[in-house]
Image (tube, rainbow, N blue to C red):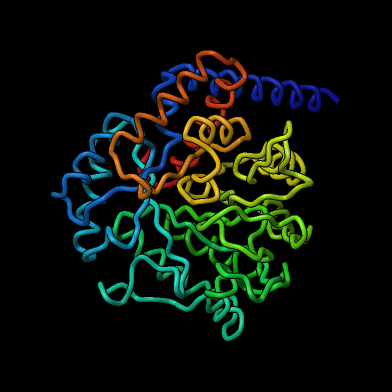
Amino acid sequence: MLMAFFVKKFLQIFLVSSLVLHSAQAQAATLDQMAGQMILLGFQGDSALAQSVRQTKKLIKDGRIGGVMYLKFNVKSLADVKAINAGFLGTGAALPPFIAIDQEGGSIERLTNAVGFAEIPSAANFASNSSVQRAQKIYYSMAKGLSLLGINMNFGPVVDLNINKKNPIIAKYGRSYGDDPKTVVAFAEAFVSAHRMAGVISTLKHFPGHGSSKGDSHVGFVDITSTWQAKELEPYRIMVKDNKVDMVMIAHLFHQQFSTEQGVQLPSSLSKNWVTGVLRQQIGYNGVIISDDMEMAAIRNNFNLQETVVRAIDAGVDILLFSNTANYRISLADEVRAIIVAKAKSDANFRAKVEASYLRIVKLKKRTGNLG
């Protein structure tokens, strides 16, 4: 009984100490620094000497952004990618950047055979023609290749269920492992495990499920009210329980039951009901949540920048992803950060969400190997 008493007391002290430490960490960073870590930005240029690359390095060094994303036009050669990333990682910033890429396999690969990076099969191909064990070996080889180039985050695996075989963005490109949650989870967990072994953060997408949709959120508003099925959440439930989730990407999908708030029709990426209500509270996910590209037409055509930033963070999103392709400007990072800081200064609840996001991001960055 005495031993149990001391154990209970120790745990209480440990929990209180952890909360105090976390609070102190948040207070040690300024609002501007915390807001910067919540921005992941696309850049122009394909060499370390390109003006945009040099400007982006300064954003990283100054803590004005927390990471960057590669698109295909940023890739001229593997040597150039490695040199660019060496610059991004070598700025001396207090918090080194996430360097992210879409390298799923199949049609969705920024690094290809053309530049000397070994391409791998699509998710559909793996599920049809390969064992989970073989898939994991191939995923590890790919992830190790990313790591050697300085890339520490991959926007995959796709855990969408292949429900609509005519889907224009998932089924069309073979991006799903299938319509059975167990099959999807088996291959997706192999993807995550392989990336963890290589020191690369992986990203489950596209919550709450893009596989049943009839439309593509890249090109416009997508309503999944009549097509979405509850089983599309199963991969997230299972993988959270299995501790196989590094990060989750929220899609821009509208569902009448979940996404109408105070009379406004909101995509899932801006919806408290989806992000906090379902993913955080129902499923129990406590890690980092990143938005899909906030410049997709589903967002850009319906919300201005102020609305987008404030609604996303208020919903519970930690990292705002901007490809910076709709109207490229290096100042976009400062614009987004200014919105976050101004809102946090005027709204204590919003500030608390910024602080919580910052702590989750720092915790995840410690896993990249670039932060002690």
Q: In the picture provided, is 89 more to the left or to the right than 321?
A: left
Furthest residue to the right?
1
Q: Position of residue 309 (x, y in %)?
A: 51, 33
Question: Is 93 above or below relative to 135?
Answer: above
Question: Is 47 above or below relative to 339?
Answer: below
Near-viewer residue (363 or 272): 272
Question: Is 117 above or below relative to 342?
Answer: below
Q: Position of residue 89 (x, y in %)?
A: 27, 44
Q: Position of residue 54 (x, y in %)?
A: 19, 42
Q: Residue at x 47, y 78 (%)?
A: 121
Q: Residue at x 49, y 44 (%)?
A: 300
The C terminus, quarter of image: top left
Furthest residue to the left?
49
The N terminus, quarter of image: top right
Q: Residue at x 29, y 33 (%)?
A: 93
Near-viewer residue (37 or 13): 37
Near-viewer residue (282 or 241): 282
Q: In the picture provided, is 370 more to the left or to the right than 9?
A: left
The total number of labels drawn is: 0
Near-viewer residue (152 or 53): 53
Furthest residue to the bottom?
129
Q: Quadrant of residue 91?
A: top left
Q: Position of residue 183 (x, y in %)?
A: 68, 72
Q: Residue at x 39, y 37 (%)?
A: 66
Q: In the picture provided, is 135 more to the left or to the right than 179?
A: left
